[in-house]
Image (cartoon, grey):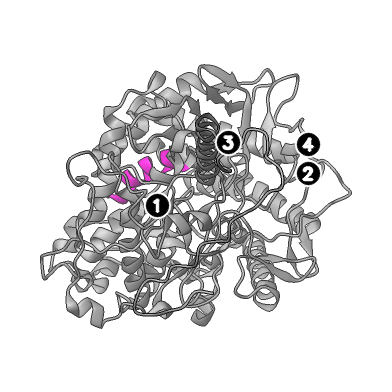
Amino acid sequence: HWIVGSGPFRPPPPPPLHLPHPLPGVSASGMGLRLSQKFVFLIFLSGLVTLCFGALFFLPDSVRLKRLFLSKTEIQPVTAGSRSENDVTVKRPKEQEQRGLTPAKGDAGTKPKVIRNPPAPHEETDGGRAQEELTLSRSKAESGSERVTSTDPHSVSDTFNFKKFHRCLLKPPLGRDNGKPADPTTNERREKVKEMMKFAWDNYKTYAWGKNELRPLTKNGHIGNMFGELWIGGPNKDALGIYYIVWLENGEASLFEVNIRYVGGLLAAYYLTGEELYKNKALELGEKLLPAFNTPTGIPRGVINLGSGTSWSWGWASAGSSILAEFGTLHLEFVHLTELSNNPIYTEKVMNIRKLLNKIEKPHGLYPNFLSPVSGNWVQHHVSIGGLGDSFYEYLIKSYLMSDKTDEEAKDMYYSALQAIEANLVQKSPGGLTYVAEWRGGILDHKMGHLACFSGGMIGIGADDGEPEKRQHYLDLAAEITHTCHESYTRSDTKLGPEAFRFDSGAEATANRLSDRYYILRPEVIESYMYMWRLTHDPKYREWGWEAVEALERYCRVESGFSGIRDVYSMTVSHDNMQQSFFLSETLKYLYLLFSDDDLLSLEDWVFNTEAHPLPIIRKSCLLDDTTQEKMVSE
């Protein structure tokens, strides 16, 4: 028993231990161990303690344990002798706190709740685990609690003029007649996709409200253990998949208000609705992203605790490295955070990443997937435009397009990377299929993942801005890659594509490993169909999209939602009982856009981030001109 008092409490000494006979190795004068035995015992004990604590930091799911032993600053690396130049001192004007952008100290009710758990390197499904961890995932960055440096009293969100922004759009966001196509068959298909969206959403709302995903077979929600969701004010799905372009045109905004994923989703919500809530939440979350950048190089770590600001790398990432598709997929959102806040720190963070990537040597001009945030060196020479690398390349060309084609550095980096990809990764199969292989230390792995199939659309949207003599070549390359990805669908029994397909051992665009045969409602192939349709208006892309709709309806639709399947080569379907959040946000959204007129979220005004959230092109000259006239096109 311990007694609480004014002075220290010392328990009485234990009674002496009496043994009837001496023990081997014990001195005659008492029970003490010999000096050599004590030394061996201490070595053993210290080794055991080191092993236990070392294991703590190398386990992939040791977040909760880390919180027990680490303060919020202990794993933030600082350069010797002084504070890191990347550290951020943040101050907030009082008026921002009064508007609710900063939660009051101790007010846990206003903090976003985050669901996040590290993915294994071979798995990229969306899911999550409730509590306060958040990652800079394939597409995004989320972060800890830090305040933005701002001594300028005008550096507040009210400087952004929403009405002026809308005057700078060339077309209304919903286009002419809400993007309804004139062709009756196409419109019928569009309405079918809309029905699929509503069916998926209604079942999620009925059975899984507040969870990450719907389990449609068992009719319950799923928290998951992979890429989770960010909760802000209510249950969260990738609900931007069914948002403005489908629901708000019918005045059903209430379906959208509490279902936002990531900073990009908040930004898109604001730009499409003008609701200050979304802007304020985006800025609030943006501030919480910043501590992840407090590394010697400014390269952010992959995971951050929103409450403490502590960040760390994935347990499975080589040597504590950061992932190319994570730290390289921030530019679009961070530039818009600067636009809305008039605070340059967000743009400075991503430009620092770009500066480092430009400076370091790249093997054969390629960007490996793992980079040390401490040394700024590549950790492994594994290159892929699929998982772990994909959206980095996408954000280079999209940064250029979003800047109204003024960001020449992004353009140069993109075309240099594309040239290296063509020279080292792009291959032609014996059957004439163009694919993009992976590169492992100079050795090609003739595999292409479903995730890499976004590259057809990426290369397509950048074709017109390449060197004049190569523009048609890029458009042809985009079409060839998209065709190969379509072949991966048509060569399966279900007409849905596998997670990865190979081009070796006689295989072409097929999965010869059981572990690659599943389909989890992924969007990348359909994403390329949508872009290629808008770029070429070749009717085959709409036909391919409709083939996918029919396959989804036949093999993935169940009584209470849509489910992935475990083997696309088996007509006897085995469902995985998971309606992924990106199915609504991306797969169905891209299908809806594919069967809509091009002026619905026109590519002249909007750039889609990697989660398919539309962000507007920034027309600086228009936004700065107080005499800007109405530019919306009305017919």
Asked if residue 451 can be seen in this view, the reply is yes
The image quadrant that residue 444 belongs to is: top right
Q: Secondary structure at mark 1?
A: strand
- Disc 2: CA contacts within 10 A as few (<14), some (14-19) or many (>=20): many
* Quarter that holds the C terminus: bottom left
Contact, mark 4 vs mark 1 (Cβ under 8 Å): no
Question: Residue 581 at x, y = what percent?
Answer: 60, 61
Q: CA distance from mark 4 to mark 1?
A: 36 Å
- Alpha-carbon span between mark 4 and mark 2: 10 Å
Residue 1 sits inside the magenta stretch: no
Q: Indicate the amino acid at tag 1.
A: Ser
Distance from disc 2 to disc 3, alpha carbons, whole Å, reads 74 Å
Residue drawn at x 34%, y 79% as measured from the top left: 6
Q: Residues within 10 Å of mark 4 (few under 14, many from 20)?
A: few
Residue position marked by numbered label 4 in the rendering: 514
The three-letter code of the residue at mark 4 reads Leu
Which quadrant would residue 282 be assigned to in this image?
bottom left
Image depth: mark 1 or mark 2 in front: 1
Image: magenta residue range: 391-405
Q: Which mark is residue 568?
A: 2
- x%, y% of residue 532? 52, 44
Give the number of the disc on residue 311. Answer: 1
Please tell me whether residue 322 is drawn above or below residue 542 in the rendered image.
above
